[in-house]
Amino acid sequence: MAKPPTSRVDKLLSSMGYGSRNEMLQLAKAGRITLDGTVLSDASIRIPVTPDLPNRMKIDGQPLDPVAGLVILLHKPLGMTCSHKEAGPLVYDSLPPRWRQRSPAISTIGRLDKQTTGLLLLTDDGALLHRVISPKRHVAKTYHARLARPLTGSEAALFASGDMMLEGEAKPLAPAQLQVLSETEALLTVTEGRYHQVRRMFAATGNHVEDLHRVRLGGLSLPKSLSPGQWVLLDEDQIAQIFS
């Protein structure tokens, strides 16, 4: 088994958004950091950075935040943007404020547009992010769409054909699966992530998506108990479900 990486405590805590390295040194001298129940007065020492560290280290009596490699499942609310810089409410506003200062930064795995709600993953693991969004992985994404007009009955065959072209594009869409729920509601599962793809697919049939909600990504479903704006950390087994 590979040895876990090590880090100076001040550098580790600074990378997690707790403050500057000098501030972390002062925090330790003030007796505000404990490790395994013992005051850690010198933040210049190196320690193994293991997944269980949040259970062993406390800052001002509070458990340490998750170490690097975290994956977050967020129920994205309506009106929030998947951006670090745009004006208005951002999905990152749902997370603890100091997490905006973490390095490596937390980023969304793919994007949901401002008017789309539902399952959104965020991570500071760049390799995982690229695995999920890679076209070679064909990670399926399922959306619940509420439409302005009744379905005609021809949409499922068109979406599944592999011949559908979107306006302004030269490559047909990969086959997608449509499950009709009612005259104006359907579940659509796609394996690509083209710009506003679901909305554009329905628009190409003469319809308009009024509400769009992502319910599933790979083998992960949005928990019914998770309200808009709430989030949970995923464990290794749940992360593996993305690719199942």
Image (cartoon, rainbow, N blue to C red):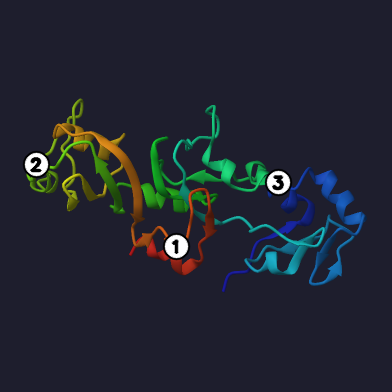
Q: In this view, does 138 lie to the left or right of 2?
A: left
Q: Which amino acid does label 3 sit on?
A: Gly
Front disc: 3 or 2: 2
Instruction: Tell which circle, 3 or 2, labels the residue nearer the N-terminal end.
Output: 3
Evaluate if marks 3 and 2 touch, with contact meaning CB atoms under 8 Å apart: no
Q: How far is the residue under mark 3 from the one under mark 2?
A: 52 Å
Horizontal side of residue 165 vs 131, given as left or right:
left
Asked if residue 77 lies left or right of residue 42, the reply is: left
The residue that appears at 17% across and 30% down in the rendered structure is 170
Whole-percent x, y for residue 126 in the image: 50, 48
- The Cα atoms of the two marked residues, 1 and 3, are separated by 24 Å
**Residue 136 showing in the rendered view:** no
Amino acid type, label 1:
Ile
Give the image location of residue 44, x and y in percent.
84, 55
The residue under the point 13% across, 42% down is: 151
User: Does label 1 or label 3 sit earlier along the sequence?
Assistant: 3
Q: Position of residue 226 (x, y in %)?
A: 48, 57
Query: Label 2 is placed on what type of residue?
Result: Thr
Residue at which label 1 appears: 239
Mark 2: which secondary structure? loop
